[in-house]
Amino acid sequence: MHTNYPDKYITMGLKIAYYRKKAGYTQEAFAEEIGKSVNFLAQIEGTGTVRGISLETLFKIAECLNISPAKLLEEDL
């Protein structure tokens, strides 16, 4: 994926991993919860790749983590 904002995607992925772990989910359990593959979630959370997600997926992730979608887009944790 080509983007002018790779750091923002990586930061969002790290936030997803942070809130997922804080909520007590493994990658496997959370991937199932949001209806995605473990590989997809690992790519989003990983710092070695830039993987975009749809707003629908962003909203589903936030809903499952019981946080505002904005939390995943903010600059600070």
Image: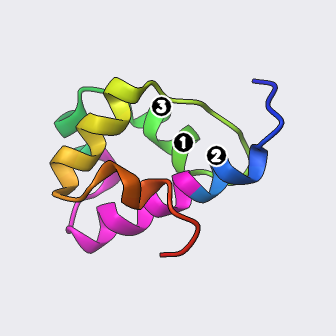
Residue with the mark numbered 3: 40
Q: Is residue 10 left or right of residue 21?
A: right
Mark toward the start of the polypeptide (3 vs 2): 2
Residue with the mark numbered 2: 9
Look at the numbered disc 3 and give the secondary structure of its residue.
helix
Q: Against 34, is 77 above or below?
A: below
- The amino acid at mark 3 is Phe
Question: Can I make out residue 16 in this image?
Answer: no
- The amino acid at mark 1 is Ile
- Write the residue at 81% across / 25% down: 2
Disc 2 packing (10 Å; few <14; some 14–19; many ≥20)? many
Picture disc at residue 44? 1
- Write the residue at 27% across / 48% down: 62
Look at the numbered disc 1 and give the secondary structure of its residue.
helix
Q: Is residue 15 magenta?
A: yes
Q: What is the magenta range?
A: 12-28
